[in-house]
Each structure stands twice: as C-alpha cells, then as structure tokens.
Amino acid sequence: MAVPPLLLSSLPYLLVVLALLASLLLPGRKARGGTATWKLPPGPAKLPVIGHLHLLGSRLLHRSLWELSKKHGPLMHLKLGRVPVVVVSSPEMAKEVLKTHDLECCSRPSLVSYFKISYGHSDVALIPYGERWRQLRKFCTVELFSTKKINSFRDIRKEEMERVTKLICSHARASTMVNLSELLLSLSCNMTCRTAFGSGFDDGSDIQLHDMLREAQAALGGLFLSDYLPLLGWVDRLSGMRSRLERACLKLDSIYQRRIDYHQDRLRQQCKEDGDILDALLRMQKDEEGLTEAHIKGVLMVVDATLFTASSSC
C-alpha cells in the first residue's frame, strides 16, 4: 500500500481537527481589491484551510467523488487544501473538457511525486503543457519515431516474430498448451526494449527494474499532504512517504545511469549511425542544446513505466 491503513483511516479526523484549530488561531483576511468573479461549478460546503479533503480520505477516491457528484452534479468544484479542482462525472462534460476546451485543460498539476520521478518534469508524459513539452514532443516525433527510424528496427521485429513463431510451433509439435497472452506480451515488451535499449525485456540485464518500478508506482499513487497543504510537508516525512519516493527514485536513477554509461562507451568505440533509441538520444544531446541527461532519463522512465504497466495488467 502507498499509505499506511491506520494513517488513511484517521486522516479525515486529523484534517477536521486541523481546520478547527486553524479557524481559531489564524486571523481572518479580507481580499484586497474586491472578491473573485470566477463562475465556479457547485460543490459541497468546505472547511477552513483543508477545504474538502475531509470528504475524500475514508474510502476509495473514485467512490467518494461519485457519491458527491450524485448530489452536486456532473460538474463539481472542490477545494483540496489550497488546490482548486473541478470534477467531471458525465460523458457530456468530459467531451467539453477533453475536446472542446482541450488546450485549457490539457496540462498536468505539479505534484511532489510526479516532479521527483520525472526529473523535474523532464519527460514527455508528465510535463505540463507548454513550450518545453512541444520541444520534447518534436524530439520524439522527428528523431525517434519517424518512418525512417521505425524502418531501421525492422530486423528486430522480424527476429522477435520468428522467435515467437518457433516457440508456438514447438508447443504444437509437443501437443502442449501455450499461454498466448504471456507470449504476446513478451513479444511486445522485447521488441520495445530492444528498440529502445538494445537488450530484451526478459534477458535478466536489469533484474531489479521491475521491483523499482513497482515502488515508484506506489509512490505516485500515494498521498502527499504537501501537495495540498504545504505547511504539513513534515507529515510526508513522518509517514515515510517522502523517504519511500526518494529511495525508489535513487534506485531507478542508478539503473538509467548504467544504461547511459554503457551506451556512451559503445558510441565512443563504434561511431555508426544506426543503433537503438537511447543511442539516438545521446547523439541528439551533442547537437541540441536543450536536451539534457535529465530529459534522456525521463524518456527511459516513460518507456519502462509503459512496459511495467503492460506486464502488470496481463
């Protein structure tokens, strides 16, 4: 579990006590220059300081939001500590957000766990929308996933397809069962890994990677109070969430650094133009001023996270 059960079950009560203390101890402040004129969706009554956090901590988050939406409608405003949130709970409202107003809603919040594991928003998946994201997207589209680059990996796809075909034939000759789900997943992961890193997913080269990604995934899904109440950042350390996140990130970083060092040594020894995606990123780093080692590690993290999600859902 990402958060200790005892801490999770007692969190609503702790937040209510905090709100009561804050309302007594903190002086009220009047807004300067008039009140805000935003037209916000309806929502439940909130408590001082913590807003609506006390409504979300005692059950699964999506269940809590569903119960609230039945009362307050498909477009609902919540205040999670200092963070304003709009909750969308119907297909019609989802279309408005994801299609009609895509540019206004396409960015991502800067959360503690996301910022840490993505090397300060240096990846493509978690980076907020903006010029930096467009630059990284251009790198990936033009240099990594162009038709020419994809065609250069044709031999890898052919070898992996032949490997799987031979394995299925051997099972057929022996009249034994074969798990096609696992086999096709292995095919997909091996093609992706060999294309990206030059080694297969199941060759044992990074035996710790799966466990490290599991730890990182748990940290990403955990509750960091500092995201919503910065003054309570010390609670994240007290609960162990911060140390768990930092430990997982350090271990992942050591794996990515080994990969980068290995490929840099290989590039120095043989200066050929072909290679895997990591080779292409390292070559781009020499030519592009904006591409740093953190960006390269961010791309590796996205590839590994995609493979881990696929293998975990199989």
Image (cartoon, helix red, strand yellow):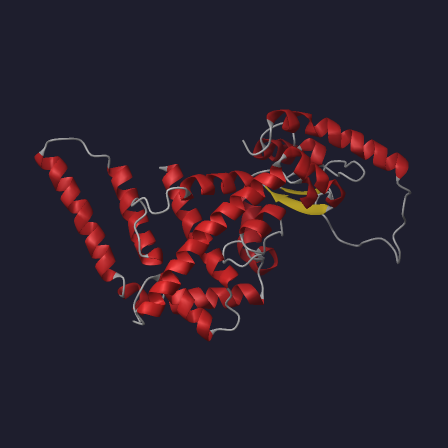
Q: Which residue is drawn at 55% across and 42% down?
A: 247
In the displayed structure, 287 sits above or below 201; it is below
Q: Which residue is drawn at 76% across and 36% down?
A: 45
Instruction: State whether residue 206 appears in this view.
Output: yes
On screen, residue 65 versus residue 265, left or right, reads right
- Quadrant in which the N terminus is drawn: top right
On screen, residue 74 versus residue 299, left or right, reads right
On screen, residue 207 versus residue 170, left or right, reads right
Q: Which residue is drawn at 66% across and 38% down?
A: 237
Q: Which residue is drawn at 37% across and 59% down?
A: 262
Query: Residue 99 in the image: x percent, y percent?
Result: 53, 56
Query: Residue 92 in the image: x percent, y percent?
Result: 55, 47
In this view of the protein, which residue sits in the foreground, 191 or 88?
A: 191
Quadrant of residue 64 within the rendered picture:
top right
Query: Residue 150 in the image: x percent, y percent?
Result: 30, 63
Query: Residue 111 in the image: x percent, y percent?
Result: 62, 48
